[in-house]
Image (cartoon, rainbow, N blue to C red):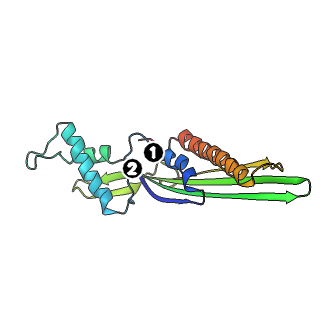
């Protein structure tokens, strides 16, 4: 999995829930993009390792045998994820009205690619046409909570606790959408 974009206005410690969404069993985590030559190099190395484990060795090189089928099996899908998180907390202090309200909006864009290789061993990644629109699907969630403020409450602590709660709920909501769509499965 390639997570090449993470943008957030949340305090850093609240980003952990969103990073956890992208940690999926069966996917290696990388910081490069699909266009990076490292994506191709990773595929070749992963295919050779896979073929070696299967006992399919190239007699000339002594390394795992690179075949079209092996590349398609080992290198697909490749997933890129872009995470955009925004939050806003406001405090209203009017006569007879004292409250804090926090909103968190999450947008996770998942792009899936399939490895393609022709018989001349020309390799490339193409958007997975069976996933979303042209290989891309966007998942969004937005949650908002309001908390009354009592005269004895610490405003910063109340806002902080409220933001933690609404951020966690948003992460759960966007993760459920991704899970329901089976977007991060091999």
x and y, in percent, of residue 72 in the image? 31, 46
* Image location of residue 116, percent across then percent down: 32, 53
Which of 37 and 148 lies nearest the eye of the viewer?
A: 148
**For the residues bearing labels 2 and 1, Cβ distance under 8 angstroms:** yes
Element marked by disc 2: loop
Return the residue at label 1. 23
Q: Which residue is found at the position 64% from the left and 44% from the top?
A: 169
Residue 51 in percent (x, y) is at 21, 41
Q: Nearer the viewer, residue 157 or 179?
A: 157
- Exactly how many numbered labels are in the figure? 2
Residue under pointer 2 = 29
Horizontal relation, residue 143 to residue 171: left or right:
right
Question: Quick check: can you spot residue 104?
Answer: yes
Answer left or right for 134 relative to 71.
right
Position of the C terminus, as image quadrant, is top left
* Above/below status of 21 relative to 105: above
Q: Residue furthest left?
A: 60
Residue at 56%, 43% (x, y): give it.
175
Question: Where is residue 55, by image quadrant?
Answer: top left
């Amino acid at each position: 999995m390639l997570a090449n974009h993470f943008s957030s206005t949340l305090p850093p410690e609240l980003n952990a829930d969103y990073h956890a969404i992208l940690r999926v069993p069966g996917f290696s985590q990388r910081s490069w993009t699909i266009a990076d030559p490292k994506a191709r190099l990773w595929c070749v190395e992963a295919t050779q390792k896979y073929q070696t484990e299967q006992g399919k060795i190239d007699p000339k090189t002594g390394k795992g045998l690179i075949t079209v089928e092996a590349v398609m099996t080992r290198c697909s899908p490749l997933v890129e994820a872009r995470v955009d998180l925004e939050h806003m907390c406001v405090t209203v202090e009017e006569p007879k009205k004292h409250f804090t309200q926090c909103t968190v909006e999450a947008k996770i864009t998942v792009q899936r690619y399939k490895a393609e290789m022709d018989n001349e061993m020309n390799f490339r990644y193409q958007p997975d046409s069976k996933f979303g629109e042209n290989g891309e699907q966007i998942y969004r969630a937005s949650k908002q909570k309001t908390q009354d403020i009592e005269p004895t409450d610490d405003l910063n602590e109340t806002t902080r606790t409220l933001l933690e709660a609404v951020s966690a709920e948003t992460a759960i909501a966007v993760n459920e959408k991704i899970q329901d769509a089976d977007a991060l499965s091999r």
